Amino acid sequence: MHMRSISLKAAVIGGLVEFALTVLVAFLFSVALLLPRLGKLMESAATVGAEVGQSWTYQASAWVIGSISSVVGGYVAARIAGHDEIANGAASAWLSIAFNVWQWAFPPDTTALVYSITMIVAAPLLGAFGGYLKRGRKPLPV
């Protein structure tokens, strides 16, 4: 079976869905983490923001949010493309890879550096998994 090309439209839309979902959910999660510290936040927003950003709870949650978003973006790309679901799912990670390469080049701290490196590798794999989920029970081409 001959592999058709990756759909640019599917990759772009899947990448944008992944990025928008990551930003939206991370923002909501950050607000939820900051609400208990609202009083202290009024005194020193930069300090509280830095404390939350450095916490392992936040870092682990950011990785989980980014990972789930990569799977969703891959699924969306595969659905739009309608063919070569796994390849199109992996291609949807383009924006995540670009953002994390940029963050890798200019890391604000070591935890962001570790996150960036893992997501550069994980995002296309997770996007491919989203494509695989969309593919369903169809046999893989030989």
Image (cartoon, helix red, strand yellow):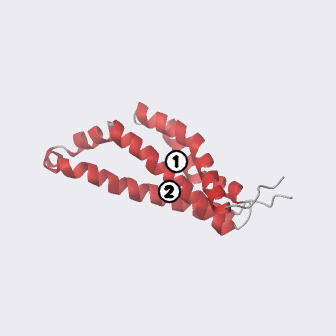
What is the quadrant of the N terminus in the image?
bottom right
Give the residue at mark 2: 19
- Tell me residue 13's x, y (percent): 59, 64
- Tell me residue 74's x, y (percent): 60, 57
Give the crowd class for mark 2: few <14, some 14-19, many >=20 residues within 10 Å: many
94 lies above or below 103: below
State the residue in front, 4 or 44. 4
State the residue in front, 47 or 138. 138
Give the crowd class for mark 1: few <14, some 14-19, many >=20 residues within 10 Å: some
- Residue 134: quarter of image: bottom right
Gap between marks 2 and 1, in whole Å? 9 Å
State the residue in front, 1 or 41. 1
The residue at the far front in this view is: 137
Q: Which mark is residue 88?
A: none
Residue 107 appears in the rendering: no
Q: At x 15% / y 45%, what residue is drawn? A: 40
Amino acid type at circle 2 is: Phe
Q: For this view, does 36 lie left or right of residue 77? A: left
Q: Are marks 2 and 1 in contact (CB under 8 Å)?
A: yes
Residue 116 appears in the rendering: yes
State the SS at label 2: helix
- Tell me residue 2's x, y (percent): 86, 58
